[in-house]
Image (cartoon, rainbow, N blue to C red):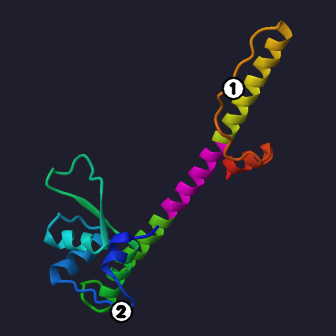
Amino acid sequence: MSNFRFQDYVTSGVFTLSLARSQVMAMHRIASGADHYACAATAALERKGLIVPVAAPDDYAPDRQEYRATGAGLMVAALLTEAGLTQDQRDATAAEVTRLQQEIEDRRAEAHTARTAARSALARLDRLETDLANERAKQRRGKLIVPILRRDPLPNASRAELDAMVRE
């Protein structure tokens, strides 16, 4: 997934990333999963593409905003830790957050595959039901159904392949 804000901020092969002390502390807190209020530092980090706002839980006060670090933000947080600009020795939390974000993306990809296979199976079922209804209508010399069917996203996949996709 591209981070367009960071790409806009970094306009060439050589760039300077300037962070004020308040931005360093805000970046560290957000990357480590700590609670953080919206402030000028978070607004600057968001403009630079290092953090993104996420939907806050219902129990949050209306003046609070939850953020998560982007991939670039996690790398910057690790660099800040290596440079000794934060209180931590090594930033294990940022690595854990990255691992969890990747796991979420993997689960989303699996869910997408299963939904695609289910849509394909449903489109095939619709097609078979329409064909069956038309065959019955032909036998009775009745009106045929004009099919308006779902598009099969996997027309060349076998039934066994669809089953395997759903089970994975």
**Number of marks present in the image shown:** 2
Residue ID at (28%, 70%):
30
Main SS of the magenta part reads: helix
Looking at the picture, how far across and down is residue 66, in whole percent?
25, 59
Quick check: 75 left or right of 25? right
Label whose residue precedes the other's in the sequence (2 or 1): 2
Residue ID at (57%, 57%):
109
Residue ID at (66%, 46%):
153
Looking at the picture, how far across and down is residue 165, in whole percent?
69, 50
User: Mark 2 to mark 1: distance in Å?
Assistant: 59 Å
Q: Which kind of residue does numbered mark 1 sit on?
A: Pro
Q: Which residues lie in the magenta part? A: 103-118
The residue that mark 2 highlights is: 14
**Element type at mark 2:** loop
Q: Is residue 130 magenta?
A: no
User: Do we see residue 148 in this rendering?
Assistant: yes
User: Do we see residue 29 in this rendering?
Assistant: no
Looking at the picture, how far across and down is residue 29, in whole percent?
25, 73
Q: Mark 2 or mark 1: which is in front?
A: 1
Residue ID at (82%, 18%):
135
User: Which numbered circle lies on residue 147?
Assistant: 1
Q: Residues within 10 Å of mark 2 (few under 14, many from 20)?
A: few
**Element type at mark 1:** loop
Quick check: 137 left or right of 118? right
